[in-house]
């Protein structure tokens, strides 16, 4: 399974010829670094004064000149100008920006350094003049600015912008730039821009060439352009139509592959959540034969632990999860041991009674949480590093939180396997699982092992709660939603078999996510449930049953 | 005593006592409630209000449901956490009929379609609503709908020898799936809101006090009949086979019985009793919605039986009434405490009272006898161990 | 399964073995393995109609597995098992096999603990085991006499109304034998019948089993060699899942293979 997963990740990166790790290109585009180069500071201030004083007629030239200055603030000033937010102080020709405050007064800043100018009155300001023509030219200049930006992300974003509405002028620019471009990703995007433009050319041969060249592009606007061209193409132009159609169908094929991979990714991440939720249960059920209906509430306690930690240390949200994981393990594990010692121990060998008693406990815990916190859902903040996504290509990205969850779930799984395989606790646990009486006669304290096992299983449920708090709202019913699924995973995988649990969780997660777009989420879970009921009746002992004479 | 036929007769005599007891006390209780409702005027301390009558009617439905659960759990060892599904299916069968009885008195005044269908812009009844305006069809469906579900599930589960906690979880999964399904508007059962705003049943207005009383009496009769049926089954050879299945299913196989067939049969019978309970419940509370499918409901039924004493039919009835009454009182005084109470009940009953109230009675009796020096060899049977 | 699975509500058909060749049980080339361990390895065994056969062998020789295969609890990987000439046991499930006339007493006595001794026997009586029949079943006088007779045979007449769970270990053994008798099987498979019995009870069991032979065929698995010697006419020795030797007790005791296996094992 692990190997399968690795291969999958590998294949993902192979597919992504345009892989890029910038979190959010859009954000980068509008932010400018706050370290203006000292050399150009004087230049830009000078130019800005000219800009302020310029007449409308001379303005385009001034703007062009201004745009040629290599300074990080250029973009900002031009954007302000385009939006009509740029002013200047009449006396000094110093450009400023202003913003209406909540109390109606204006905040005024220096246009370039962004230093506050508290002593300037509003009446002393004047708007820098613009008109539509100027705005248009600024737009072009800005695009050009972005296209030549040293930041790859900015260039990519600018190129994407161009793709949706290329103009002859910009395409000529792009053509020029593409000769110098070093970066492969940017270059391929540039080619797309050029070819998209070429699609609307009057020359059928050029169009044909463009259509053929574009079949590898995944940009949504490329597909739009192709479709638009196809619609506009004369029916008699069979060759071009065919080329366009192939290009579109090729793109669609690729898209569907990526959407399958995306579903797979969602499925695996859901599977990871299921794995985390179920694996604790697999241990308690597999080893002790105890059905713990309060398992879901152990998950819930873990989620609330995360909430409490974030409330107690609001300044350390970034690290809250690292604190919450051990804390949730301890809290849920402790409660689990309490339940085992207080109730389950007395119901040994009576699984149905255990089921009922633990169900009672789950009701009490839910109500307890309702009384202590609130019946309402609680919002758990996500640390910065959990948000954002890994943009692999224009139509395919992996969100970091899901990615981390998959990795984390596998880590927990491996850790658990190691504990069970290598540690003395694990040895005792397995001994008790296989033959309780024999283990006891070998002076293994089966009581102690039971408590420890139950604590371990519950603790892992707590960890699952931490993870869930990152995906859904934290409420008293959090656990209930997962308990049936967890049981199904355990039963599906085969009781007492951790690998079975892994495979079952991943399978169920994936199947669910593949069904969802077709049937809707409710029907998908119903189908999965019914399918499982049918499966269980074919193979009552799950995917990987324990065989042998003793297993009766 | 050494005469074997004599022992059977003695056996029968003992059993018939409990049957008589239960039917007689049911009769007296029903008579009392009816009498006090009709004869004493409002304001008199003896007066039983229509609200209370309906409440009692509800309890009797629950008691019937508890009988159904006890039949499979107490006697056959099948812990069903999904009996709410059968109850709800019976309820929906009744609800569909009541819905059609509204006729054009609904908000939209459509003579054919219930309001929610008009709201969804449907222009005809779905095929499975066909016949729902006939009483006979409704009665058939009250039995058949739960029976089909029980039969299909039973065939699948028992044939493949799914048992114990696996089975319990499966039953819970099924009712959960049904709940999700019935929440969907496309199912054609009113979605989230379910079926409600009923006007009349077989021509009697549901708002009138006499109808309420009538429904209560019908429920009491149905309960008595259900008790009789269960009692008959449990005391036939069938009942002994089923008990044997509970305690040693594999052994039963080697004696030549097919446990899965017996289990399917008793599961179906139990489902039908639950269905009837649901059908009688709906006109009294005036609504049926997917919430009845919720796993929590089903598990609450189990605690009635556990509390009353599983493997004892009258225990199930007592348990259902006691716990439901406690719930009514608790939720009225401090609603949030009820779940603590219910949860605590689960833990305490399983830990301290494995045989429930019915199991306590013989113990109390023997203690009483001991104290007062009576020589009586009341045999307290060994505790019921479930498989 | 085959068409015999049918609806659960239908009465069961009665199947009876064809024993014109004098053989009531054929087990040919039967192999069973659990996770690579061969519990039965190409085993061949024939039981004659009316015979009393003893099966002996060390633990793990495959005696109980063989019983499991015959009664339908375990399905063999390969091989053929038939009751008489024509009844293919591999096509039937446990209850059908029981109804066809193969009764089994388990190693660990299993009786229905929550039922009385009388009820245990009542359930075991031969006859239709269908649902409707059970529901409206009334014992006729013939059946009552039969139960009384069995109670006398197994010495539990006084315990008739007692719950079976309250019986002693030895009494449970007897009750289980009684249940076998009530079912009137053509073939009885008896797994360690005298474990936990007193010497006197053992003797009575030996008597009972020998008296049953002739009318019924009996296969006894037993570790108690003295007991085997006292009842056996023909003994089969199982070793590592196959038949090692077959013959009278004295033949077996002088068989070099048997001596080698047993003595070798004991010394090694």
Image: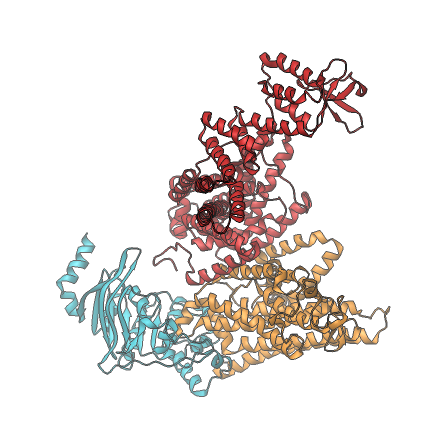
Chain colours: A red, B orange, C cyan
Q: Is residue C30 left or right of residue A317?
A: left
User: In the rendered view, would you say B8 is above or below A39?
Assistant: below
User: In the rendered view, would you say A43 is above or below B154?
Assistant: above
Q: Where in the figure is residue A19, as x and y percent of width and height?
A: 46, 35
- Which residue is at the front of the view, B281 or B120? B120
Q: Is residue B53 left or right of residue A546?
A: right
Q: Residue at x 39, y 82 (%)?
A: C149
Q: Can see residue C115?
A: no
- Asked where in the image residue B210 lies, by quadrant, the reply is bottom right
- Which residue is at the front of the view, B305 or B220? B220
- Which residue is at the front of the view, A126 or B55? A126
Q: Where in the figure is residue A395, as x and y percent of width and height?
A: 51, 41
Q: Where in the figure is residue A514, as x and y percent of width and height?
A: 49, 52
Q: For the image shown, how many numbered marks are present on the structure?
A: 0
- Which residue is at the front of the view, C62 or A292? A292
Q: Where in the figure is residue B149, as x and y percent of width and height?
A: 54, 69
Q: Residue at x 60, y 24 (%)?
A: A32
User: In the rendered view, would you say A473 is above or below C207?
Assistant: above
- Asked where in the image residue C84 lies, by quadrant, the reply is bottom left
Q: Is residue A510 left or right of residue C263?
A: right
Q: Can see residue B108?
A: yes
- Asked where in the image residue B64 lies, by quadrant, the reply is bottom right
């Amino acid at each position: 399974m692990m190997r399968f997963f690795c291969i999958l990740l590998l294949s993902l990166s192979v597919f992504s010829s345009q892989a890029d790790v910038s979190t959010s290109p859009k954000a980068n585009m509008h932010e400018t670094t706050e370290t203006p180069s000292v050399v150009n500071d004087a230049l830009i201030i000078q130019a800005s004064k000219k800009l302020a004083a310029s007449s409308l007629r001379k303005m385009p030239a001034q703007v062009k000149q201004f745009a040629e200055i290599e300074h990080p603030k250029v973009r900002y000033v031009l954007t302000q100008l385009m939006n009509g937010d740029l002013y200047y102080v009449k006396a000094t020709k110093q450009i400023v920006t202003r913003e209406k405050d909540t109390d109606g007064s204006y905040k005024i800043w220096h246009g370039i350094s962004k230093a506050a100018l508290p002593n300037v009155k509003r009446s002393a300001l004047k708007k820098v003049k613009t008109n539509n023509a100027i705005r248009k030219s600024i737009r072009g200049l800005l695009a050009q600015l972005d296209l030549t930006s040293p930041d790859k992300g900015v260039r990519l974003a600018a190129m994407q912008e161009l793709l949706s509405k290329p103009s002859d002028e910009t395409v000529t620019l792009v053509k020029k730039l593409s000769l110098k471009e070093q970066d492969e990703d940017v270059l391929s995007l540039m080619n797309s821009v050029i070819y998209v433009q070429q699609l609307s050319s009057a020359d059928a041969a050029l169009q044909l060439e463009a259509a053929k060249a574009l079949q590898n592009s995944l940009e949504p606007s490329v597909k739009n352009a192709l479709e638009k061209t196809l619609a506009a193409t004369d029916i008699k132009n069979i060759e071009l139509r065919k080329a366009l159609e192939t290009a579109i169908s090729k793109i669609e094929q690729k898209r569907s592959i990526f959407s399958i991979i995306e579903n797979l990714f969602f499925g695996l991440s859901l599977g990871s959540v299921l794995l985390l939720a179920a694996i604790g249960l697999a241990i308690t059920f597999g080893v002790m034969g105890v059905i713990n209906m309060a398992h879901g509430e152990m998950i819930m306690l873990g989620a609330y632990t995360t909430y409490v930690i974030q409330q107690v240390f609001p300044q350390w949200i970034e690290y809250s999860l690292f604190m919450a994981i051990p804390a949730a393990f301890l809290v849920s594990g402790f409660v689990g041991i309490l339940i085992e010692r207080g109730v389950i121990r007395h119901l040994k060998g009576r699984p149905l009674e255990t089921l009922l008693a633990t169900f009672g406990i789950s009701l009490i815990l839910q109500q307890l949480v309702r009384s202590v916190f609130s019946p309402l859902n609680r919002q758990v903040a996500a640390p910065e590093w959990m948000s954002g996504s890994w943009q692999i290509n224009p139509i395919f990205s992996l969100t970091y939180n899901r990615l981390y969850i998959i990795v984390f779930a596998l880590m927990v799984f491996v850790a658990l396997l190691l504990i069970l395989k290598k540690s003395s606790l694990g040895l005792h646990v397995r001994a008790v699982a296989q033959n309780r009486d024999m283990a006891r006669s070998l002076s293994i304290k089966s009581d102690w092992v039971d408590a420890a096992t139950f604590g371990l299983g519950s603790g892992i449920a707590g960890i699952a709660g931490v993870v869930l708090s990152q995906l859904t709202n934290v409420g008293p019913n959090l656990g209930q939603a997962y308990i049936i699924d967890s049981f199904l995973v355990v039963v599906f995988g085969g009781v007492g078999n951790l690998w079975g649990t892994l495979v079952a969780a991943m399978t169920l997660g994936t199947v669910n996510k593949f069904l969802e777009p077709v049937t809707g989420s409710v029907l998908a879970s119903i189908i999965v449930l019914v399918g499982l009921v049918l499966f269980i009746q074919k193979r009552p002992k799950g995917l990987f049953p324990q065989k042998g004479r003793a297993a009766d | 005593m050494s005469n074997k036929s004599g022992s059977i007769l003695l056996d029968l005599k003992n059993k018939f006592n409990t049957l008589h007891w239960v039917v007689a006390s049911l009769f007296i209780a029903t008579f009392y409630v009816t009498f006090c409702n009709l004869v004493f005027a409002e304001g008199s301390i003896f007066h039983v209000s229509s609200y209370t009558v309906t409440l009692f009617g509800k309890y009797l439905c629950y008691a019937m449901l508890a009988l159904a659960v006890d039949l499979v759990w107490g006697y056959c060892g099948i812990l069903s956490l999904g009996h709410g599904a059968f109850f709800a299916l019976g309820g929906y069968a009744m609800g569909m009929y009541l819905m059609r009885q509204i006729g054009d008195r609904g908000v939209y005044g459509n003579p054919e379609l219930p309001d929610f269908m008009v709201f969804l812009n449907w222009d005809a009844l779905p095929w499975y609503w066909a016949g729902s305006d006939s009483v006979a069809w409704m009665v058939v469906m009250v039995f058949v709908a739960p029976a089909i579900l029980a039969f299909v599930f039973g065939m699948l589960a028992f044939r493949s020898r799914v048992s114990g906690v696996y089975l319990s979880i499966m039953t819970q999964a099924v009712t959960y799936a049904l709940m999700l399904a019935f929440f969907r508007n496309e199912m054609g059962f009113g979605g989230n809101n379910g079926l409600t705003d009923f006007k009349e049943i077989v021509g009697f207005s549901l708002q009138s006090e006499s109808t309420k009383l009538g429904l209560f009496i019908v429920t009491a009769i149905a309960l008595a009949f259900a008790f009789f049926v269960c009692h008959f089954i449990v005391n036939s050879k069938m009942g002994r086979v089923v008990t044997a299945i509970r305690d040693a299913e594999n052994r039963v196989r080697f004696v030549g019985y097919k446990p899965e067939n017996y289990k399917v049969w008793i599961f179906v019978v139990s489902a039908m009793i639950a269905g009837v309970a649901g059908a009688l419940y709906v006109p009294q509370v005036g609504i049926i919605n997917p919430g009845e499918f919720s796993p929590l409901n089903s598990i609450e039924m189990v605690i009635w039986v556990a509390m009353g004493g599983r493997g004892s039919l009258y225990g199930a009835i007592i348990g259902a009434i006691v716990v439901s009454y406690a719930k009514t009182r608790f939720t009225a005084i401090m609603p949030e405490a009820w779940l603590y109470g219910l949860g605590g009940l689960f833990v305490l009953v399983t830990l301290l009272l494995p045989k429930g109230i019915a199991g306590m009675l013989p113990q109390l009796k023997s203690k009483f006898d001991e104290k007062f020096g009576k020589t009586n060899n009341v045999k307290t049977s060994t505790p019921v161990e479930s498989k | 399964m085959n068409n015999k699975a049918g609806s659960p509500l239908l009465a069961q058909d009665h199947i009876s073995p064809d024993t014109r060749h004098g053989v009531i049980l054929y087990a040919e080339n039967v192999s069973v393995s659990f996770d690579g361990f061969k519990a039965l390895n190409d085993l061949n065994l024939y039981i004659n109609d009316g015979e009393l056969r003893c099966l002996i062998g060390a633990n793990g020789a495959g005696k109980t597995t063989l019983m499991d295969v015959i009664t339908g609890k375990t399905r063999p990987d390969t091989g053929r098992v038939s009751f008489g000439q024509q009844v293919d046991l591999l096509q039937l499930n446990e209850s059908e096999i029981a109804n066809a006339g193969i009764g089994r007493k388990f190693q660990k006595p299993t009786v229905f603990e929550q039922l009385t001794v009388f009820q245990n026997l009542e359930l075991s009586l031969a006859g239709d085991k269908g649902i409707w029949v059970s529901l409206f079943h009334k014992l006729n006088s013939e059946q009552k006499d039969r139960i009384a007779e069995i109670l006398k045979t197994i010495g539990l007449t006084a315990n008739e109304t007692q719950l079976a769970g309250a019986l002693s270990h030895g009494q449970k053994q007897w009750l289980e034998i009684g249940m076998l008798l009530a079912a009137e099987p053509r073939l009885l498979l008896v797994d360690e019948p005298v474990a936990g019995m007193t010497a006197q009870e053992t003797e009575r069991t030996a008597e009972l089993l020998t008296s049953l032979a002739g009318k019924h065929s009996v296969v006894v698995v037993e570790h108690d060699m003295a007991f085997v010697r006292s009842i056996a006419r023909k003994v089969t020795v199982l070793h590592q899942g196959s038949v090692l030797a077959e013959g009278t007790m004295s033949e077996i005791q002088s068989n070099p293979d048997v001596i080698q296996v047993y003595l070798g094992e004991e010394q090694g």
